[in-house]
Image (spheres, helix red, strand yellow):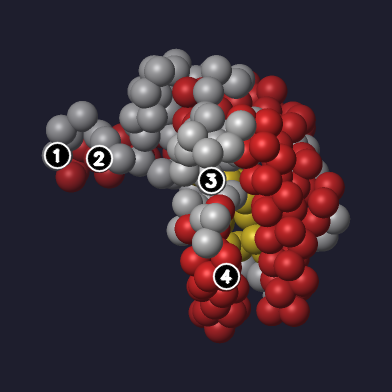
Amino acid sequence: MCFELSSPDEGVRGSAFRRLCRWIVYASKLGVRVLVVHAAFPRPSLDMRYDEVIKRIIELNVSYVKELAKLAEDHGVIVAVENCMEPWFCSSPPDLLLLMEAAASEHVGVCVDTGHFNVNSINPADAIRRLSGYIVATHLHDNDGRHDQHLPPLSGNIDWRGVMGAFRGAGYEGPLIYEFGSFGGQSPRNVVETLKLVTEYLKALT
């Protein structure tokens, strides 16, 4: 979907965008309040200069987010743009702020992915503070700062005390959603216990 939204083929782009619009409608019917999406990403190409690619991707994403804002408002849904991995657009707070300002809508916000910021060498707590006022969803996970490992909090090198303090300072009161991909081979019982301990610790920091 991310690549299709930035396809040079107008038909492919249009089809992908219509599909995204349908998801907003489905979310509304299912009672989903926040729908997390990724920005449009370009496929590597030798046909365009880097500055041309960046300009085109910004134009596409600004156009998309303005249209999505209108549709989301009509259906009572909030669209949350997730920060992604470098080198893609929306991997940094300035990219996300650009879209938020373009949308200028309470129905478009940011989904903070702590692990992605960490791998991108962006302090998650600093990013949260910069995005204050726009955060509507979270994907919480940890890593070693080099790989997108999707580990439970406290399993990598993210400063969770700083992260939770930043959320508190930003006035974020929404759910804290985990996005894990690995538990180091733990048994299901141990996974449950790990989640309980992590949750209790994070709650104590808020």
The quarter of the picture where the C terminus appears is top right
* Front residue of 8 and 165: 8
Q: Which mark is residue 191?
A: 2
Q: Marks 2 and 3, Cα distance to the nearest angstrom?
A: 34 Å
Q: Is residue 124 left or right of residue 95?
A: left
C-beta proximity under 8 Å, tags 2 and 1:
yes
* Front residue of 194 and 162: 162
Indicate the secondary structure of the residue bearing disc 4.
helix
Q: Is residue 21 above or below residue 206?
A: below
Q: Marks 4 and 1, Cα distance to the nearest angstrom?
A: 45 Å
Residue 190: give x, y in percent of width and height. 21, 37
- Amino acid beneath label 2: Val
Q: Which mark is residue 14?
A: 4
Residue 123: give x, y in percent of width and height. 61, 20
Check disc 1 and report the residue beneath it: 187
User: Nearer the observer, disc 3 or disc 1?
Assistant: 3
Give me the residue at 74% from left, 32% from top. Answer: 94
- Amino acid beneath label 3: Phe
Please tell me in which quadrant of the rendered image residue 93 appears: top right
Give me the residue at 85% from left, 55% from top. Answer: 104
Q: Marks 3 and 4, Cα distance to the nearest angstrom?
A: 15 Å
* Front residue of 99 and 126: 99
Dot placed on the residue nearer the N-terminal end, 2 or 3: 3
Dot placed on the residue nearer the N-terminal end, 4 or 2: 4
Indicate the secondary structure of the residue bearing disc 1.
loop
Q: Marks 3 and 1, Cα distance to the nearest angstrom?
A: 37 Å
Check disc 3 and report the residue beneath it: 41
Q: Is residue 51 above or below residue 41?
A: above
Indicate the secondary structure of the residue bearing disc 2.
helix
On the question of residue 97 being in view, the answer is yes
